[in-house]
Image: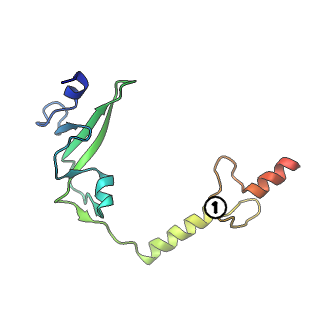
Amino acid sequence: MSAAWGKCFDPSGALYGVPTYPWRLAPDGLATRRQLRAEGLRPGGQPIAAQAMRINRRTGTPRVAYLYRIDRAKPVRPMTSRKWGALALAMLARRTCPACRVDVGYCIPRSHGICGMCLAAQDTA
């Protein structure tokens, strides 16, 4: 067993306070938030059941992913019409150029802050 793997294996939780498993070696029945979301679930207020850990080879600092019990997870709340409307308005604001006030059909890059046509006009001026 490598030293890095040994630091990440604490199934009793004596070292870190919660059961800790090496990356990708967590027991069945536990999942990260992303894995829950892919199955249409959310943690639903349950406490962290365990954590998956790996040691960064370059810096030596641990990377941690919290794990939740799948059997206690709740279904994701459905989007309401108001949430869809708010999301549509937010995306419209990201697509609208502040200089020419035109919906350009793509998200304006934050690095420039204006659309490609306004940027080209600025470069030629």
Depth check: give the residue in front, 57 or 46: 57
Residue lying at 28% horizontally and 60% vertically, measured from the top left? 42
Q: Relative to 17, does residue 105 appear above or below in the rendering?
A: below
Residue 105: x, y in percent? Answer: 65, 65
| Circle 1: residue type | Tyr
Residue at x-position 32% and y-position 59%: 37
Q: Which of 28/72 is in front?
A: 28
Q: At numbered mark 1, what does the secondary structure look like: helix, strand or loop?
A: loop
**What's the residue at 19%, 33% (across, down)?**
16
Q: What residue occupies the far bottom of the structure in this picture?
A: 81
Instruction: Name the residue furthest left.
Output: 12
* Quadrant placement of the N terminus: top left
Specify whether 69 is left or right of 54: left
Choose top left, top right, bottom left or bottom right for residue 114: bottom right
Task: Name the residue rendered at 27%, 45% in the picture.
Answer: 66
Q: State the colouring used for the structure image.
A: rainbow
Percent from the top left, x then y, of residue 10?
15, 33
**Residue 52 coordinates in the image, percent (x, y):** 25, 40
Tell me where residue 72 sits by quadrant.
Answer: bottom left
Which residue is labeled 1 in the image? 106
Give the residue at the far front of this rendering.
1
